Amino acid sequence: MPQSPHDRAAEFHNKAAHAHEAAATAHGKGDHLTAHELTKQAHEYSRDAHEYSVQALEHARKAAARE
């Protein structure tokens, strides 16, 4: 069964949070290259989360209009 836009947004928000935490850990250990790569990945996940959040909003608006 396909995931709803809400579920996909939540998934990417969680992935972004995890990548941010991993980046902070790497940075704390002095591994700035890894921290930078993880930060870039977190940013990509955040953009994906935003995209799915917009889709979820549109989905909710359409459902409300049908009621």
Image: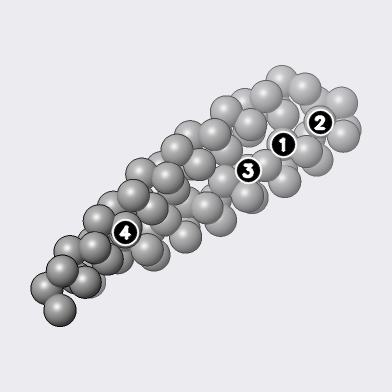
- CB atoms of marks 1 and 4 within 8 Å: no
Q: Secondary structure at mark 3?
A: helix
- Percent position of residue 66, x then y: 11, 73
Which residue occupies the extreme bottom position in the image? 67
> Spatial distance from mark 2 to mark 1, Cα to Cα?
6 Å
Mark 3 or mark 4, which is nearer the start of the sequence? 3
As helix, strand or loop, the secondary structure at mark 2 comes to helix
Q: Please give left or right for residue 13 compared with residue 4 in the image.
A: right
For label 3, count other residues whose C-alpha is less than 10 Å away and answer few (under 14), some (14-19) or many (20+): many
Query: Which residue in the protein does label 3 denote?
Result: 19
Quarter holding the C terminus is: bottom left
The residue labelled by disc 4 is 56
Residue at the extreme left: 66
Residue type at mark 1: give it: Ala
Q: Amino acid at mark 2?
A: His
- Looking at the image, how many numbered discs can be counted on the residues? 4
Residue at figure coordinates x 63%, y 50% from the top left: 17
Closest to the observer: 59 or 38? Answer: 59
Q: Nearer the viewer, mark 4 or mark 3?
A: 4
Task: Name the residue at the top extreme.
Answer: 33
Q: Which mark is residue 27?
A: 2
